[in-house]
Image (spheres, helix red, strand yellow):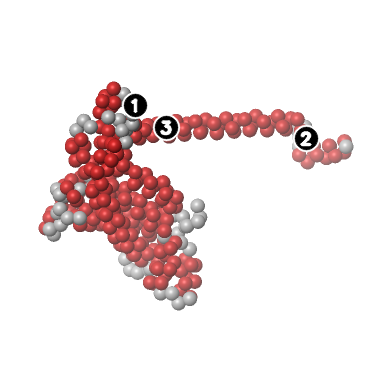
Amino acid sequence: MSIVTSTTIERTGSAPVPPQTAGATRVPRARRRHSGQFWIYTALTVLATLGLLPYLFVFSTSLKSTQQFATDYWLPSWPLHLENYAKAWGQIQPYMVTSLLVAAAAIVGIIALSLLAGFVLARFDFPGRAFFFTLVIALMMVPGIASLIPLFVMMRDMGLLNTIWVLIIPHIAAGSVLGTILMKTFIEGIPQEIFDAARIDGAGPARLFRSIMLPLSLPVIGTVSLITIIGVWNDFFWPLLTVTQNELKTVSVGLIFFQGQSGTDFGPMFAGYLLASLPLLLLFTFLSKYFLAGVQGGLPGSH
C-alpha cells in the first residue's frame, strides 16, 4: 500500500485527495454554478417582464370602457368589454388586407430578384462581378429620405399615385438591395462540391438553381420575407404621402385614421393596436428559427 501511495505521489506531484475532501470541493462549485444560473434567470425574467409591460398595458386597456379607463388607469377592471375587438376589427380589417397584399407582392418580387442576383454573383465568374456587388453594397449607404422626392416624382409621372403599385414597387426596389446581399452571402456558404457533383450529372444553371440552390436557401428566404413584412407593416410616411383613398391605406396609416375616429374611446383604439401587431408577433414566433439561421448563414438542419 505504501509503495502504491509513494508511486502516486511521485507521478502526480501531490498526495491523493481523500474522497471526503473531493466531495466537499465539488459541492461548493456546484452551489456557485447553480447560484450563478439563478441570478442569470432572474435578470432575464426581469428584462422580459419590463419588455412585456407595454403589451400588458395595451391588452388591459383594450378590454376597458372609457369610464373604466378613467378610473382604473393601470389595473384591469371588470366587466371585460370584448366588443371592443369586434369594433376595432371592423375598422382596421381593410387596412390589414391592403398591407398583406402589399407584403405578399413585395416578398415575391424581392425573393425573385435577389435570389437570381445572389445566385449569379455567388456562383458565376464574369468580368466586373466584384464591381457590381460593390455597387449593390453602396446602395445601402444611400438614406431613404434622399430618394423620397425623386421617387415621388417618378411615381407621379408614371401615373401610379393612389394605386396599389405605388406601395409595392418601392418596397421591391429597396428590399432587393439587402436581399441580394443576404442571398449572395448565404449561397457562398453552400459547399461547392454539391454544385460540382450536380454539374457532373449533367445539370445546367437552371437545374442547379431550381433543384439545389432554391431548397437550400429556405432559411434566408424566410429571413428576407420576415424583414419585408416588418418593413411593409411599419411603413408610414410613404403610404401617407402617395395614397389618399381610404381603401388603399396600409395598417400604419389606417391606425392613425382610426385613432382620429375613435377620439377618447380608448378601448377599441388599443384593441386595434393589438390586432394590428398580432400578424408580426405570430410570424416571428413561427419563423424565428429560419430567421436566425438565415442571418447566421446556416443551412437547413444545421442549427
Q: Which one is earlier in the sequence, the residue at label 3 or at label 1?
A: 3
**Sequence-earlier tag: 3 or 2:** 2
Callout 2 amino acid: Pro
- State the image quarter where residue 66 is shown: top left
Q: Position of residue 174 (x, y in %)?
A: 26, 54
- Please name the residue that numbered disc 1 is placed on: 77
Residue in the foreground of this view, choosing between 46 and 71 = 71
Q: Which amino acid does label 1 sit on?
A: Ser
**Mark 2 = which residue?**
16
Residue 273 location (% of width, % of height): 29, 39
Work out how far the residue at label 3 is from the one at label 2, CA to CA, in angstroms. Answer: 50 Å
**Marks 1 & 2, CB-CB < 8 Å contact:** no
The crowding category of the residue bearing disc 3, from other C-alpha atoms within 10 Å (few below 14, some 14 to 19, many at least 20), is few
Q: How crowded is mark 2: few (under 14 residues within 10 Å), some or many (20 or more)?
A: few
Badge number at residue 49 = 3
Pointer 1: residues within 10 angstroms few (<14), some, or many (20+)? Answer: some
